[in-house]
Amino acid sequence: MKKKLIRITTVPISLEKLLEGQLGFMKSYFQVIAVSSEKERLNTFGEEQNIPVFHLEMTRKITPIKDLISLLKLYKYLKKEKPFIVHTHTPKAGIVGMLAAKMANVPNRLHTVAGLPLLESIGIKRKVLNFVEKLTYSCATKVYPNSMGLKEIIIKNNFAKPLKLKVLANGSSNGIDTEFFNPQLFSVEKNEALKQELGIQKNDFVFIFVGRIVGDKGINELVAAFEELQNSALQTQKFKLLLVGPFEQDLDPLKKETIHSIKNNPSIISVGYQQDVRPYFAISDVLVFPSYREGFPNVVMQAGAMGLPSIVTNINGCNEIVVEGKNGWVIPVKNTEAILSAMRHCLINTTAFIKAKSNARIMIETRYEQQLVWEAILEEYKVLGMN
C-alpha cells in the first residue's frame, strides 16, 4: 500500500501554478492529498488532478485567532489520516502545517522555502515574523530552501541549523516544463494577431513584466524607468511595456503616480491576470523583473524557456538563473536608474542582446528542466522511507 503524502499551500493557486504537475507525478508513488484554503477553487483542483483534498481556511495576513482555529482543525485531520510525510509551501501554510504535524507526531515534516516576505518588514512586525519563521523550521524535520542564496540568508539569520537545510537539484520548487514553455508552439501569425489586439506595432520592442502588480515586485521603479526611457529615447525607437498579472492593492499598494501612468500611458499595456502567460512572452523581447525579494522565481525560468533574456535584480534565485551578460543582466534592487540603463542597453547594444537571447533557452533546459527537479524531490522522499 502506498504511503500517504500531504502537500499544503496557503492558497490553491500555489498548487496550480507553483507546483504545477508535481502532485500528479507523485501520485504514482504515494497516496497524495492536497490541503489549502478557498474551498471551491481547491475542490476544482482536486477534481482536475484526481487528488483528494482537505479544505483549511488560511490567510496570507497575520490573523492569530483564525490561525489557531486552522491549526486545531489540521491537527485533528492529521491525527486521523496519519500521513508518512507532510510537505508545506508558503509561510502561513508552513507555520500551521509544521506545528500541526509536529503535534500529531507525523514522522517526516518537510517545508520548502520559496521566498522570505519578512525581509521587507521592519520593527515589531519583523520580530514577529522572525519568530514564526524560526518556529516553523524548528517543527520541521527538513527544510528545503529553493535557492543557494535563500539557504545562506536562513543561516545568516540563524533561522535553522545548516544540517537541517538542503537545496534540491540546482534550485527551484518545481523546475520548468520546457516542452510547454516553448516559443516554437507560437506561430508568427498568432503573435501578430495578439500584437494587433493589444495595439503593439510590428516592429515595437516589447519589455514584459509577469507577476503580481505590487510594490515589492519593483513596479514603481519599473514604470518610472520606462517613462524616463520614453523621454530620453530617439524618435526612431519604438517600444512598449507589457504588464501581465493581477493588481493587489490591499496587500502592497503601488504609488498613486505609478497607477496613473499605467492607466494613462498608451505605451504601457496592462492585461491583468492571465491563465496562460506564454502568448505574452511570445510577443515580447526582454523580461524585466525588478523584484525586491524572491525564492526561485518561476517567471524568470519561463521567460528563459520562451527564449527571452531577462533583466533581474541582484537577489537570490534571480542571480542564480541569470548569469550577467550571458542570458541577461543583473542590476541593484530598488534602483530606477539601473533599470533604465539595462533597458537602454537592450535597445542600443544589439550584439549583446542577440547573444543573451541565443543563450536564454539552452541555459534553462540544461539546468532547470522540470523532470530533474521532480526526480530530486522524489529521491528525497524515498530516502526518508529507508530511514
Image: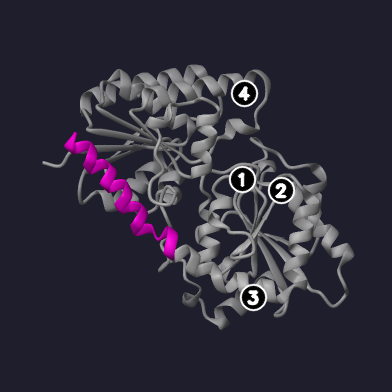
Residue 354, label in figure = 3
Residue 315, label in figure = 1
Left or right for 332, reference 37: right
Q: Secondary structure at mark 3?
A: helix
Label 4 vs 2, first from the N-terminus? 4
User: x%, y% of residue 50?
Assistant: 26, 50
- Which residue is rendered at x = 28% and y = 53% of the image? 25
Q: CA distance from mark 3 to mark 4?
A: 43 Å
Classify mark 2: residues with Cα within 10 Å, few (<14), some (14-19) or many (20+): some
Q: CA distance from mark 4 to mark 2?
A: 23 Å
Residue under label 4, please give it: 126
Query: What type is the residue that disc 4 sits on?
Result: Arg
Depth order, front residue of 1/286: 286
Left or right for 332, reference 58: right
Q: CA distance from mark 3 to mark 2?
A: 23 Å
Label 1 vs 3, first from the N-terminus? 1
Label 2 vs 1, first from the N-terminus? 1
* Range of magenta residues: 366-387
User: x%, y% of residue 117?
Assistant: 58, 34
Q: Secondary structure at mark 2?
A: loop
- SS assignment for the magenta stretch, majority: helix
> Vertical placement of 96 versus 371: above or below?
above
User: x%, y% of residue 171?
Assistant: 44, 49
Residue under label 2, please give it: 332
Query: What type is the residue that disc 2 sits on?
Result: Pro
Query: What type is the residue that disc 3 sits on?
Result: Ile
The quadrant the C terminus occupies is top left
- Which residue is rendered at x = 21% and y = 28% of the image? 82
Q: Is residue 283 visible?
A: no
